[in-house]
Image: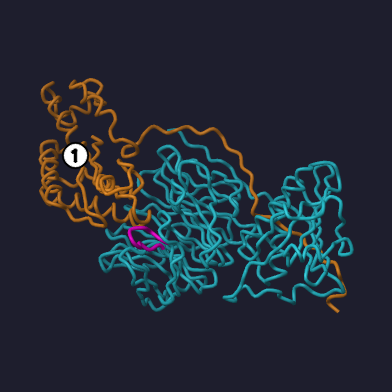
Chain colours: A orange, B cyan
Amino acid sequence: MRYGSLVRVFLILALMVGGFSCSKTTVPPPQPGFGPGAEGLSEGAGTAGTRGSGLDEAKWRELGLTSEAEKKEFLAKAQTFENQDIYFDFDAYTLSEPAKRILDEKVAFLKRYPKVKVTIEGHCDERGTTEYNLALGERRANSALQYITNSGAGRTNLTTISYGKERPVASGQDEAAWAKNRRDHFVLNY
Amino acid sequence: MLQTKQLIMWWGCIFITAVLFLGWRGTTWAERVYIDITQPSFERIPIAIPDFKRQTAEQSQLARDMGETLANDLDYSGVFRPLDPKGFLEDPQAVGLTAADIKFPDWRRLGADFLVRGAYQVQGSTLRMEGRLFDVVGSRMVFGKVYEGETRNWRLMIHRFADEILFALTGERGVFDTKIAYVQAQGKGKEIYVVDFDGNNPIQVTRDNNLDLSPAWNSNGTQLAYVSFKDGGAKIYSLNLMDGVQRLICGYPGLNIAPAWRPGSNELAVTLSKDGNPNIYLISSSGDIIQKLVQGFSINVSPGWSPDGRRLAYVSDDTGNPQIYILDISSGQKRRISYSGNYNTAPAWSPKGDWIAYSSLVGGRHNIVISRPDGSDVRQLTHGEGSNEDPTWSPDGRMLAFSSTRGGSSAIWVLQTNGTGVRRLTRNGGGQELPDWSPRVSGR
């Protein structure tokens, strides 16, 4: 009779309890596109000088800029380039007319300075899922990439990255904040 | 270049011995299911859980902690309604544990259908815990069980005992030994954490100082796949929870996101945009592409497997906005299953295969809904209490964890699939999201 034995012994292997140890970690230096973009440059441009811009002589030569005036002009234009985002409608990645006008300025900059390297970041507002927004952000970045290359700027120095809804610039939960977050941001990597 | 040293986490092998003894006259508990919780008329079972009885002087606080933890477990299951101990008439330390010691009429008057009596002894670092379940109406013991192990693992013993109680009365196992992985925002970054099913023991498992997203358990609960931006763009990594080793699974150009392990295999469904469009692929655990599953000109993301691994729920914006579709892997046939509203995302297939949960934009808010896999019988489980997203099923299919902003910042919440029993799971600051419920992994 199987009920005859009143005692059963189970040996239970508890797999689901873990401990952990950790070693002290070190925060890596900021990477392009992680955190506020291109800190070195903004600093330099803010003082309207070329020192402290994060650009050394070799880099200036690479960009083909030698005179102080040229450098100043570049830094001013670079600051505008980075500070002007383009914006999108909810769940959309088509370019509006104002967005195209801003992209035209960026095309002009890229034609004037063809050696610069640019990362186009696609961003979304907080609504919707992380994964869908990563895909949507990529489409927004690609929309700008396509427009710029169709306008005759070289593609080789352009890369895209999507941060989805992970890097908002405005923290509110209303349309005013969401509209600011549905954007492409442009980062110069030289 | 500095390399972030990984934390090492191991699955501690904890040994707890357990001895079961059956109830009065050897009536088997396993063959008789007391309660059919699938009945629509089901009401939570009132159960009394007094403090455990101290049999040694050490660790006196455990008397209350054990009783409270057991009550919390049973309440969490959605099957029981633990009674408030304030109304209990006798001193649990003064009364014995046998049926002869128990005044069943008193417990009946308090409204209890079942009663748990527990006792424990601490000797050095060893804990011996005994728990007994009594049928108050029948004035008899249902079963008893003795557990022995290290004192620091007392919580696990209680979870085991709770599981036995649930099994004895419903014929189904609970989720008391499972965990939930989620994303924790801290500073500018996000890291992956793992927490017990009841919100205890949150443990940080990644230290990438970057953006880590979308944790996904493999079938045996030993690995998490997740997305990290630590090497530039979004790439998919795995974290082995046995040895703490992290490994790149795939880093194709463009997006590498939305990992979902195929049940019972080492394959994953993922979204890759390497060919321009975000499509869903079947890949090996080393990132080799096995098969393109969903392709087109639309956004295709968030794959979620059926429990048999033959079908895949996913999100596509084929119609201009995100909707839920189901792909039959062998035939390649696709079928849209969400028709209400214009923003349906994050499908999760229930462990028994009978439901699909997803997040639906209703009245400007994301809410959790469930429907049958053919799209019928849509039921809305949340109703605009903040934004409710990314549902994940408990392995017994009775509960869903999800992220919600109903308490302010985003946190992980849990509810029963009948919409009741809502409880908050995570309370640390910074915001938590993207929960994924582990499988059951303990050997039984």
Q: In the rendered view, would you say A47 is above or below B333?
A: above
Image point 45% across, 66% down: which residue? B357
Residue located 37% across and 76% down the image: B332
Residue A23 coordinates in the image, percent (x, y)? 56, 35
Q: Is residue B145 left or right of residue B83?
A: right
Q: Magenta span: helix, strand or loop, mainly?
A: strand
Indicate the position of residue B98 as horizontal and vertical percent values: 87, 62
Residue B398, above or below B430:
below
Nearer to us in this view, B30 or B299: B30
Identify the magenta region: B359-367
In the image, taking residue A64 as reference, residue B444 lies left or right, namely right
Q: Quadrant of residue B145?
A: bottom right
Task: Classify mark 1: residues with Cα within 10 Å, few (<14), some (14-19) or many (20+).
Answer: some
Q: Quadrant of residue B340?
A: bottom left
Q: Nearer the viewer, residue A138 or B139?
A: B139
Horizontal relation, residue A116 to residue A35: left or right? left
Q: Residue reaching furthest front?
A: B109
Residue displayed at 51% across by 73% down? B353
Q: Mark 1 belongs to which subunit? A: A
> What kind of residue is marked 1?
Gln
Question: Residue under circle 1?
Answer: A84
Quarter of the image with the N terminus of chain A is bottom right
Query: Is disc 1 placed on a helix, strand or loop?
Result: loop
| Residue B272 x/y as whole percent | 35, 58
The single residue placed furthest to the right in the displayed view is: B100
Q: Quadrant of the C terminus of chain A?
A: top left
> Is residue B360 in the magenta section?
yes
Give left or right: position of A18 versus B115. left
Q: Relative to the observer, which residue lies in front, A20 or B405?
A: B405
- In x, y percent, where is residue B301? 36, 61
Q: Judge by depth and name the residue closer to the eye, B419 or B73.
A: B419
Q: How many numbered marks have been drawn onto this rendered protein structure?
A: 1
